[in-house]
Amino acid sequence: MALSTQTRYTYQYGSEAENYYQPLPRPHVEPEYRPAVEPQKKIDVVFGLKLSLCGMTVFVCAFVYIHMYSTLITRQGQLQTVKNEIRALRSTISLTESQISEKLNLDYIKYRASRELGMSEPLPHQIVYIQLPKQSHTIYDK
C-alpha cells in the first residue's frame, strides 16, 4: 500500500513550464493633435435661441389674446350701455306719443277749452261762412 501512494503522487520540483509571454513591440505613433472643436456649445446656443423664440412666441400670443379679450369685454359693456339708452329713448318716445294721442282727442280738447280756458261754443250769429275756390282745398285720404 505504501508503494501505491508513492507512485501516485510523484512531483518534481522545477518541472513547470516557463513563462514565455513577451509583449509584442508596438510601433511608436505620434498622437495627432486636432484643434478642439466644441460643437456641443454651438448646438446649445442654437437650442437656446430656438427655446427663447418659442417662449417669446407663446408670450406674444398670450398677450394678444388677453388684449383682445379685454377689448371685447369693454366693447360689450359699451354695447350694453347703448342698448339701455336706446331702450330708455324708445320708452320716452312711446310715452310722448301716448301723451300726444291723448291730447288730440276731441273730447279732451272740448273739456280743456271749456273748463281750463273758459271758452264756450260760438253762437249762431258769431259763425261766418266763407267760400273758397276749389284749388285752395286740401284733400285728405286720396
Image: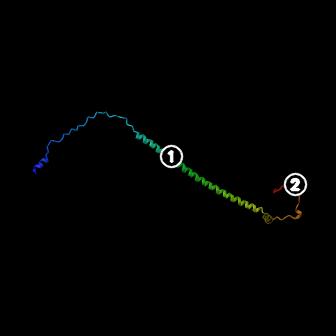
- Determine the secondary structure under disc 2: helix
Taking the image as shown, residue 82 lies to the left or right of residue 130, namely left
Mark 1 Cα-neighbour bin, 10 Å: few <14, some 14–19, many ≥20: few
Residue type, label 1:
Thr
Q: Residue at x 45, y 41 (%)?
A: 46
Quarter holding residue 84: bottom right
Taking the image as shown, residue 92 lies to the left or right of residue 126, namely left
Q: Nearer the viewer, residue 127 or 92?
A: 92
Q: Nearer the viewer, mark 2 or mark 1?
A: 1
x, y percent for residue 86: 66, 56
Q: Is residue 101 above or below residue 71?
A: below
Q: Residue at x 47, y 44 (%)?
A: 52
What residue would you read off at disc 2?
A: 134
x, y percent for residue 47: 44, 43
Q: Of the numbered discs in the image, which one, if any, rests on residue 125?
A: none
Q: Residue at x 10, y 49 (%)?
A: 3
Residue type, label 2:
Lys
Q: Of the numbered discs in the image, which one, if any, rests on residue 57?
A: 1
x, y percent for residue 87: 66, 58
Q: Is residue 108 above or below residue 142?
A: below
Q: Nearer the viewer, residue 5 or 141?
A: 5
Q: Nearer the viewer, residue 75 or 4?
A: 4
Q: Nearer the viewer, residue 103 or 135?
A: 135
Q: Outermost residue toward the left?
A: 2
Taking the image as shown, residue 16 lies to the left or right of residue 73, namely left
Distance, label 2 to label 1, CA atoms, is 83 Å
Q: Is residue 30 above or below residue 66?
A: above
Work out whether mark 2 precedes mark 1 in sequence or the reverse, and give the earlier one: 1
